[in-house]
Image (tube, rainbow, N blue to C red):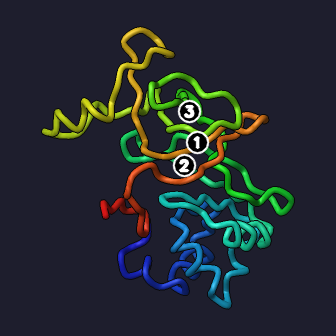
Amino acid sequence: LASQDTQRDPELILQQVQAQGITLLQATPSTWRMLLESPNAGILAGRRLLCGGEALADELAVRMTALGAQTWNLYGPTETTIWSALQPLSSEHSHPYLGKAIHNTSLYILGEDLSANPVGVAGELLIGGDGLARGYFERPALTAERFLPNPYGEPGGRFYRTGDLARYRADGVIDYISRIDHQVKIRGFRIEL
């Protein structure tokens, strides 16, 4: 884990990567953008790069994969223990879809009445599985609104309403479309406008 001062300086991060022989790095798109603007970004070649915390832009995904690094787009809100889906990227397939569910996680794209949407039809993305939080600390009304009984999973299971609009592609990969509310993410932090 890099110190606060190191996190703000791309040259210090890259020096640490090289000095410590780090092979796997995880950061937000804003940090990756900062690192790739460094003249020493070539240090990242051949490493594993994980990107998450906010939407990964196509052009940044192309720049990351062009390094010859193994690159993954990761998706998931804090309420589901951070990562819920992943999508490997390559120079041939660099569009950052949300991907497919990680182990012990279920992803659902549902209509307003919580009925399952067919492939290609947009709906709200809901997440269930082992990583699901119990709810919001001392906020029972918000917990009841966002954490619902899951009629598609095991008895007693729940899922979380992400507020993300998405659709399934024919290959089972999830494509993010937009938010269904006015929330935005800046450097991985959610902001209510």
Q: In the figure, 135 relative to 41: above or below? A: above
Classify 10 Å Cα crowding around label 3: few (below 14), some (14-19), many (20 and above): many
Please name the amino acid that badge 3 sits on.
Ile
Q: Position of residue 34 (x, y in %)?
A: 55, 81
Q: Which residue shows up at 43% across the image and 69% down it?
A: 187
Give the residue pinned by disc 2. 75
Give the residue pinned by disc 3. 109
User: Would you say residue 185 is visible in this rendering?
Assistant: yes
Q: CA distance from mark 1 to mark 2?
A: 5 Å
The foreground one among 104 and 1 is 104
Q: CA distance from mark 3 to mark 2?
A: 15 Å
Residue at the left extreme, as displayed: 138
Determine whether, in the image, residue 6 is placed left or right of residue 92.
Answer: left
Label 2 element class: strand
Q: Are marks 3 and 2 in contact (CB under 8 Å)?
A: no
Q: Which residue shows up at 52% across the image and 65% down it?
A: 27
Determine whether, in the image, residue 106 is placed left or right of residue 185.
Answer: right
Residue at the bottom extreme, as displayed: 39
Q: Are marks 3 and 1 in contact (CB under 8 Å)?
A: no
